[in-house]
Amino acid sequence: MADINDRVRLALEELIGSGVESGLQVAAYHHGELVVDSWAGLADVQAERPVDGDTLFTSFSCTKGVTATAIHMLVDRGVLSYDEPIANHWPQFAQRGKQNATIRHALTHRVGVPQMPEGITPEAMANWDYMCEAIAALEPLWEPGSQTGYHAYTFGWILGEIIRRVDGRPINQFVQEEICVPLGLDGIHMGVDDANESRVATLVDGPRPDLPPSPPDALITRAIPPAVGILAEPYNKPLVRRAALPAHGGLMNARSLARMYAALGNGGVLDGVRVLPEERVRIATSLQTDDLDLAIQQPVRKALGYFQSGPISAMGPRTTTFGHPGAGGAIGFADPEHGFAFALTKSSLVAGAEPGGSAVEVIGALVRRELGFPDDETG
């Protein structure tokens, strides 16, 4: 492990030296063994606080994979069913034509309410009850189930409120008690508490391509409004860090995210701890749709809450690979065919890197080469 960690750390330092990245962590499991646990850079540039293995990074949509895992646990226990209406557990959600929207629709971004409520602010976004009431009152932009469009933020309140209503625990408590404690994870939080506030990295805005902004009426702009867009300022706010944002606000370290995917990629079990039965993992990670995503404006391979990989994905070319990327360049995934799980967390919100040049692609290819993966899977 020492040699591969040294090479990964050197590559991380080169990325930081290029001026593109600020602070990063990488972790990887291979056949159940932690083979990479490396980090570099600063968690807080102004305070010159270095990143360590325990640093927590806002990892945006990597959070969706954790939330989906929680849903699958409740389905497996018979508390939920994928094809039952959300309104069975949340009657108010039936408003304005959403009475037939199902949990499967929510997991595959087909409910039809990717748009955030009008006039959204970071303060409103951090208010769980307000957001659930506002999302329940949204009118779907298409008949639920008929099309798919990335519910970048609303995914989290829809599924998180279902969990709260059927289980009684807020989603962060459920995740801590049902996923983190059994697997020994100390680095996945949906809302940080006093004890962990000092571990959180400060986000920085990284380089972005010089492209015109999306029109205000574009679906992706409605799903990710500028007031709560993928920028450092709103997500560095203490009230946002403390909020439960189950689609896009998880605070994580790479070793915890990689360990969760190591369990899922191993049929739901790691070191004798079973999170999900193997058959449930198979169902949860099977392809549901690869239709054109109306928000992302390209086809996306979607399983039940996770994305599947494909020929041009940063997760590698195998379509059996599943996980979720996060805005700014974070990622977590499992490649079951190779017994491989990988996570990268970071503080610099980088968009539009040249193909092959992102941190995930550079470090992912390096780790695959070090582990002896085929040349066509190492970049």
Image (cartoon, helix red, strand yellow):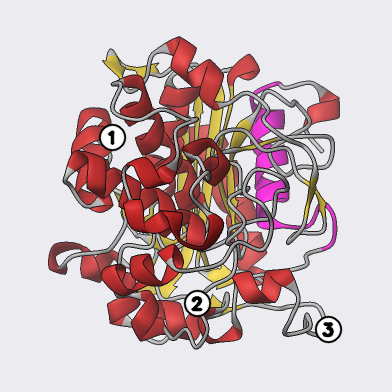
- Of circles 1 and 3, the one toward us is 1
Q: Is residue 193 visible?
A: yes
- Asked whether residue 366 is drawn in magenta, I would say yes
Q: Amino acid at mark 1?
A: Ile
- Of circles 1 and 2, the one toward us is 2
At mark 2, the secondary structure is: loop
Residue 104 location, x and y as percent?
53, 36
Distance of label 3 from label 2 (alpha carbons):
28 Å
At mark 3, the secondary structure is: loop
Q: In the image, is residue 187 above or below residue 75?
A: below
Q: Which residues are magenta?
A: 354-372
Distance of label 1 from label 3 (alpha carbons):
41 Å
- Of circles 3 and 2, the one toward us is 2
Residue at 35% x, 69% y: name it.
Answer: 133
Few, some or many residues within 10 Å of mark 2 (<14, 14–19, 20+): some
Q: In the image, is residue 28 above or below residue 280?
A: below
Q: Amino acid at mark 3?
A: Asp
Residue 288 location, x and y as percent?
67, 30
Q: Which residue is mark 3?
A: 210
Q: Which residue is mark 1?
A: 179
Distance of label 1 from label 2 (alpha carbons):
31 Å
Q: Amino acid at mark 2?
A: Pro
At mark 1, the secondary structure is: helix
- Viewer-proximal residue, 358 or 99? 99
- Viewer-proximal residue, 359 or 10? 359
- For the C terminus, the image quarter is top right
Q: Which numbered marker is on residue 117?
A: 2
